[in-house]
Image (cartoon, grey):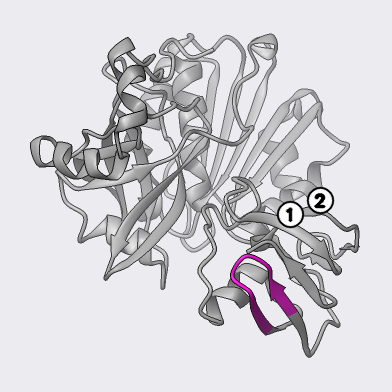
Amino acid sequence: MSAVTPVPTRPRSRLRRLAAPFVAPPVFDFWAQRLHPTWTWERPLARIVGHAPAAAGAVTLTLTPNRHWAGARPGQHVNLGADIDGVRVTRSYSLDAPVAADGRITITVKGIEGGRMSRHLLDPARIGDVLDIGPGFGDMTLDPAAAGVPRLLLAGGSGITPLMALVRQLAGQGMPAPVTLLYWARTRAEFCFADELRALAARQAGFDLRFMLTGEAPAADDEAAGRIEAEALASLVPDLAARHVDACGPGGFVAAAEGLLTGRVAALRSEAFTPPPRPPADDTGTVAVRLLRSGRDLQLPRGIALLEALEAAGVKPRSGCRMGICNTCACGKSAGTARDLRTGAANGEPTQALKLCINSAVSDLVLDL
């Protein structure tokens, strides 16, 4: 476990419990935030207190959450929300380190072409800005029962952020078992945490590091070239079959890792930070979608994520990670068939919770929106 526990929510005082029936939280928040930007009745907020370059096109933000934040474990994501050009935008980001003793957290954000939130955090966001923050979610965390198990961490691009949190947590424990990190990027300028990782590899005999370049030739002893493939993994990690493997990166990278390692290592966990590769679909045309709560009837295209289709139709459901992890966009489906875009499997079971970001419509649907 981490040497530092996540920030706990403080129990309500007796005065607050007594006052609760008479307090309108939005009104309280309006006036309290005139005194301090993160003072609220119960709404979790985080203030940006640090903004520093991390690599080409990436920044590290330091945030101080208020006392209402429920905390997160190393390797988990949090949803962050901001008003951008008058529109509320929420996206998920991984903590890149355990929660600090003073409650501060850090996230490292890579700019994405067309990504409204990432571009906002890279440039317009400034020290002092306040963001909504959700509790930690995700299962890529360390199991104390497996502390002595050798690990292999496979990071593709921005997939380094949750794995860096695990590396820092393990370093704080003195690296109780061998750890190998293979980190892929197109150019060496895109590697985040490079100096810190190299310093850690020099200090810790049990930590093996290799930077994998796909767009430049290797120039240092700890660099290699090539995409993720079986021969490279076998060469760089001779005891591969004994390793517990965590893989994180774009959907294609994660799919490749799963194809190479499933059934060939002691354990495998994976997480894609972009939508996974979609199997070829023959879903064409449109379907009728009824939104029960709003009473709207829409014609939506088959073959694309329902979240994307709804947004294009002017409906803005709550969303977060957009990769099927956080459940923010999940809603009830009382009728119809949807297809999981990760596997291609169709499910027509009624009264089902449907993740809009990873499912498309196959037939007419009735959604609780």
Residue 203, visible in the rendered structure: yes
Q: Secondary structure at mark 1?
A: helix
* Distance CA(mark 2)–CA(mark 1): 5 Å
**Residue occupying the point 39% across, 30% down:** 198
- Callout 2 secondary element: helix
Residue at the (76%, 30%) spot, across then down: 240
Callouts 2 and 1 close, C-beta under 8 Å: yes
Quadrant containing the C terminus in the rendered view: bottom right
Q: Position of residue 45 (x, y in %)?
A: 31, 38
Specify the principal SS of the magenta part: strand
The percent position of residue 28, horizontal first and vertical second, equals 23, 38
Q: Which mark is residue 259?
A: 2
The residue positioned 70% from the left and 32% from the top of the image is: 245
User: Which is nearer the eye, 16 or 214?
Assistant: 16
Q: Quadrant of residue 140?
A: top right
Q: Determine whether 209 is above or below 229 in the image.
A: above
Which residues, given as a range, are shown in magenta? 289-298
Image-based side of 66 in relation to 205, left or right: left
Give left or right: position of 14 versus 148: left
For badge 1, the amino acid type reads: Ala
Q: What mark, if any, has residue 256 been given in the picture?
A: 1
